Amino acid sequence: QVQLVESGGRLVQAGGSLALSCAASGRTFNRFTMGWFRLPPGKERELVAVINWSSGSTLYADSVKGRFTISRDNAKNTVSLQMNSLKPQDTAVYYCNANSVALGRDYWGQGTLVTVSS
């Protein structure tokens, strides 16, 4: 059974930093793209950052470029999102995602709430 378990969400002041972690289990993810998405209050879900598990190549939303960094630890099967210079508009539920078009698989975690106060 595949599981993605996020952790690290909490209340933080604007300008602060926060690190989210996603523990992935239940299968190998070397053919997956791992990503962080977020659901801001009253808005639609949006992509934050993705990383190819095998190559390590990354992609970021324009709104977080230069502030957020996605990384993965192959040995620990974790994907992390380091968030710096946080803004109130970063407030959202953050979700971990594992997607493989080749395998036709798409998995989601339960989400972790990040609240940035002004």
Image (tube, grey):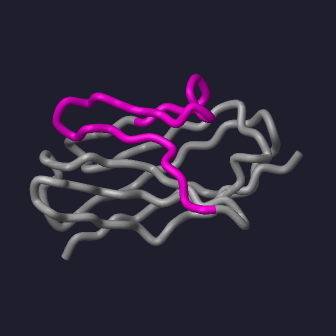
Q: Residue at x 38, y 41 (%)?
A: 50
> In front: 94, or 19?
94
Q: Residue 102 location, x and y as percent?
A: 11, 53
Extreme residue in the right direction: 118
Q: Residue at x 40, y 55 (%)?
A: 22
Q: Residue 6 location, x and y as percent?
A: 46, 61
Query: From the viewer's perspective, is residue 41 above or below residue 81?
Result: below
Q: Is 43 positioned to the left or the right of 118 in the image? A: left
Q: Residue at x 20, y 42 (%)?
A: 75
Q: Residue 15 location, x and y as percent?
A: 78, 33
**Which part of the image, by quadrant, shows the N terminus?**
bottom left
Query: From the viewer's perspective, is residue 23 above or below residue 3?
Result: above
Q: Residue 59 location, x and y as percent?
A: 40, 32
Query: From the viewer's perspective, is residue 69 above or below residue 89?
Result: above
Q: Is 23 positioned to the left or the right of 40 in the image? A: left
Q: Is 106 positioned to the left or the right of 66 in the image? A: left
Q: Is residue 42 magenta?
A: no
**Which part of the image, by quadrant, shows the C terminus?**
top right
Extreme residue in the top direction: 66
> In front: 105, or 44?
44
Region in magenta = 44-70
> In front: 25, or 48?
48
Q: Is residue 45 magenta?
A: yes
Q: How many marks?
A: 0
Q: Residue at x 45, y 40 (%)?
A: 49
